[in-house]
Image (cartoon, rainbow, N blue to C red):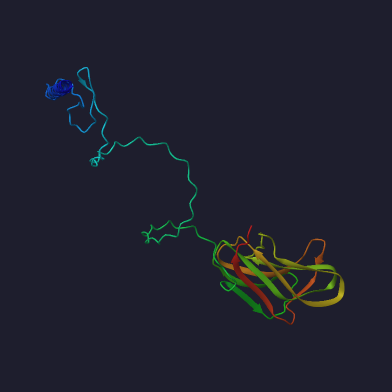
Amino acid sequence: MMRSRVKLSTMFVLIFSLLAAFCFAKDNKPSDTKAVSSCPSCNNGGQTGMWTYMTCVPGAPGAPGRDGAKGDLGSPGKTGTQGPPGTGGKKGTKGEPGLQGSAGQKGQRGDKGDSGSPPLASHMNWKECAWKKEDGKDSGLIYNCDFVKKYSDTSLHVYYAGNLRVGYCDNCCSRWYFTFNGAECSSPGTIDGAFYMATGRNHNRHHHRQIEGHCNNIQKGKVRVGFSVGKCVIRHKLANADTGWHSMNRIFIEEVAKAQQ
């Protein structure tokens, strides 16, 4: 019984020695021989492998190691291609007023403009001729009043104020009128007043009257404004006229801007 035990122990020692020698040979084999991860005599941190047909079986993998240190930054990438335009945005709110800019340079002098109409007023160029004398002529010039007109493109405003009469006749008429340098006004028309009597052979009525109007197209310079009396129309005979009975006679002349068209 003791011999059997000794033989068995000797056999285990022999097997163990063989295994140790084999593993030592595997660990020291040339570099072109594929290494195994573990075997009964390898101390690599793994579990003990099993020897099968003279080959070491790898043990179970060990626990994962810790994360390595952070690597260096890589080089910047290339610029990508431009993307398509985006959709239009909403209109923004009105901004605050900006600061006032500095004054600009002085501009060049402009061309001379056209002459405008003279800004005339009644106090700028006017005249009044007044006299106190009764004139009993039936036809002819009563009075002349000279006036200096400053502009060509203006009008003359004239009027007579005084006492006029027709009398001592039937179906008769007298006309008092203005002239400019000896001619009656043509634009816009004559400036006159006619007084008719149907049955007045025994009538002698004196009345204060006024004759007034404007005359265009009169050249600048001296203008002789006359006030005359004469016949009305062909079918009415000339009346017995009288001008300025017991009162002042007045001719008023004023240069004014031309009327609108």
Quadrant position of residue 70: top left
Camera-nearest residue between 60 and 17:
17
Q: Is residue 104 left or right of residue 121?
A: left
**Quarter location, residue 119:** bottom right
Q: Is 78 above or below relative to 23?
A: below
Viewed as shown, does residue 46 lie left or right of 97? left
Q: Position of residue 195 (x, y in %)?
A: 79, 69
| Residue at 31% in and 37% down | 79
Q: Quadrant of residue 45?
A: top left
Residue found at the far top of this picture: 53
Considering every residue shown, the one lying at the far bottom of the view is 246
Q: Considering depth in this image, is 129 or 55 the residue closer to the camera?
A: 55
Which part of the image, by quadrant, shows the N terminus?
Answer: top left
Q: Position of residue 258 (x, y in %)?
A: 60, 62
31 to 178, vertically: above or below:
above
In the displayed structure, 157 sits above or below 4; it is: below
Task: Residue at 26%, 31% (x, y): give it.
Answer: 61
Measured as percent of width and height from the top left, residue 52 is found at 23, 19
